[in-house]
Amino acid sequence: MGKQDRTSFADYLLTQTPDTAAALREVRECILRAAPDASELFNYGIPAFALVPGGKRDQQIMIAGYAGHVGFYPHPSVIGFFASELEGYKRGRGSVQFPNSRPIPSDLVVRMVLKRLQMIAPGGSCGKGQC
């Protein structure tokens, strides 16, 4: 099954190792716990969660599975906000890698999603050009 053939999160999990699939399920649960109204979709061939109806890329959180880790893509502003708590994890400008060899920091993931929701809400920092 190629990237373009994926139509569901379950299909995506079939392409992953058991450890990565388990970590992806846990991160997905955290996202949906923080944002129960999020819409699941695929963006760039990976699972994405639109935090607002019809949410564009900057209103989505994405996750991706790799051989040794799960990539979590909340937004560069969220990564910056939680930088001190993300020390010890490999990070990019808008992403963090959660290695399969360590437990998913569920509480942190939930707080990161809640922060992004707060930022994109009407009157949030993104509406004030601070995103």
Image (cartoon, rainbow, N blue to C red):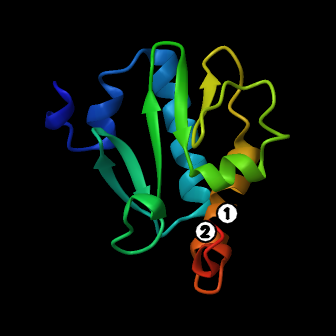
| Crowding near the residue tagged with mark 2, few <14, some 14–19, many ≥20 C-alpha atoms within 10 Å | some
Q: Residue at x 68, y 32 (%)?
A: 104
Q: Quadrant of residue 93?
A: top right
The amino acid on which the numbered mark 1 sits, given as a three-letter code, is Leu
Q: Position of residue 7 (x, y in %)?
A: 20, 44
Query: What residue is pinned by disc 1?
Result: 114
Quadrant of the drawing holding the N terminus: top left
Question: Of the numbered discs in the image, which one, if any, rests on residue 131?
Answer: none
Q: Relative to the observer, which residue lies in front, 21 or 69?
A: 69
Judging by the rendered image, the residue that carries numbered circle 2 is 117
> Which residue is the extreme one toward the right?
84
Q: Is residue 98 above or below residue 61?
A: above
Quadrant position of residue 5? top left
Tell me the CA gap for discs 2 and 1. 5 Å
- The quarter of the displayed image where residue 131 is located: bottom right
- Give the amino acid type for the residue marked by disc 2 in the picture: Leu
Nearer-the-camera pick, 29 or 88: 88
- Rendered residue at 62%/62% (across/down): 116
Q: Residue furthest front?
A: 129
Indicate whether 58 appears above or below 26. Answer: below
| Crowding near the residue tagged with mark 1, few <14, some 14–19, many ≥20 C-alpha atoms within 10 Å | some
Q: Could you tell me residue 18's position as x and y percent?
A: 45, 16
Which secondary structure, mark 2? helix
Could you tell me residue 32's position as x and y percent?
A: 54, 57
Left or right: where does residue 30 sit relative to residue 88? left
Do labels 2 and 1 touch, CB within 8 Å?
Answer: yes
Helix, strand or loop at disc 1? helix
